[in-house]
Amino acid sequence: MVKQDYTVSFVTPAFLGDAEQNGSWRTPPFKALLRQWWRVAAAKEHNYNHVKLRETEGRLFGNAWLENNFSQSQVKLRLDNWRSGKMNAWAEAPKSISHPDIKFPVDANLYLGYGPLTRNKEAKKTTFKDKLNAAIQAEESNALKIIYADGSNSAIQNTLQIIHWLGTVGSRSRNGWGSLEFGGDGVVFKPLEQNNPLLQVISRPLEKCLELDWTHALGNDDKGLLIWRTKENYVSWREAMKDLAKIKIAFRTSLKFNRHNGQMDCRHLLAYPVTNHPVSVWGNQKRLANQLRFKVTKTAQGYIGVAYHLPCGIPSQLLNALTEADRNWIVKQQLGVWQKVHGILDQQMQRI
């Protein structure tokens, strides 16, 4: 077994809850994060075959379903402690931004963190939901030990490198909360650069990614990888998050609702549900997670916001619930919708 020690630090506050939804350091979310990005790192090697990939994942991370091959996990994680988060109240000053669909200024923190965050109407400020001890604050760190089978060394190392580049954890992590980084004595991770061989291995053309209904690769197009960074370097994570909120509003509101009420429309392809614009056959219970994700990264020049696209088709459970007309509409429109979103990001940000 190989044993490696790291320091894991949060760049932005993490809504990483325990059983009572209070902010707390726990290993299960980090184990889930490792598995999530391992799938992306290993997908090409398995020819993007989800059945073979799942079998290998089961043998590496443990399973109770492989016939005659049940196994415990060969990967173990240990945190130095499982302490509660230190952010006991949301004291961040509102970062007001404008939204074309809303008449009054919007707090960027609330826009990207709605759920664990809410608005106190009486005090007219953003607060934790239900006033719980809901976050691990930025700059908090913990010692993390990872133990794994020697034969898995390259796969685990590649996965940790990808997490260092793009990983976030906890509630609303796809919006940049819970952005993390690894460090430690003698630990060296490479910077996020377009020509890194590992990034090329885990990327596929956008059109190919949309053919599968599960997350398996970063997208690329004729301009390169679908990874962007903010044009500016900021002195704090707060300013980087504010910029990401403005960028999200820009690409979402560029997609207007032009079809009849209850039909699938362009903005539904980004994530679902959409406030005040339900798809009739999906109702309010169906969920489509964001494919376009954010992260805040700390560099020698300051903080930057990162956006990246892990494209995939609409999951079959959602697709099969739609009318035939809406399914045909998706086939014709899906690629063009994402290309329009990428065009907005090319204007608002810059490719790595």
Image: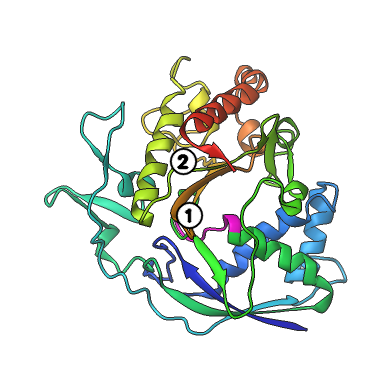
Answer few, some or many: residues within 10 Å of disc 2's Cα (few below 14, many 20 plus, some between 14 and 19).
Answer: some
Q: Which residue is tagged 2? A: 231
- 269, 238: nearer the viewer: 238
Q: Is residue 66 above or below residue 206?
A: below
- 326, 309: nearer the viewer: 309
Q: Which residues are magenta?
A: 165-172
Q: Residue 154: x, y in percent?
A: 79, 67
Q: Secondary structure at mark 1?
A: loop
- 267, 282: nearer the viewer: 267
> Hey, what amino acid is under mark 2?
Lys
**Majority secondary structure in the magenta region:** loop
Q: CA distance from mark 1 to mark 2?
A: 22 Å
Instruction: Look at 36% across and 66% down and name the residue there.
Output: 135
Q: Which labelled disc corresponds to residue 352?
A: none
Instruction: Look at 83% across and 48% down and name the residue there.
Output: 49
Q: Residue furthest right?
A: 68
Q: Residue 73: x, y in percent?
A: 73, 75
* Quarter of the rendering containing residue 208: top right
Verify whether residue 193 appears in magenta: no
Is any atom of residue 176 visible in this view?
A: no
Q: Is residue 64 above or below residue 125?
A: below
Task: Please identify the quadrant where the C terminus is shown.
Answer: top right
Q: Residue 341: x, y in percent?
A: 53, 29
Task: Please identify the quadrant where the N terminus is shown.
Answer: bottom right
Q: Which residue is tagged 1? A: 173
Instruction: Look at 35% across and 45% down and name the residue there.
Output: 242
> Hey, what amino acid is under mark 1?
Ser
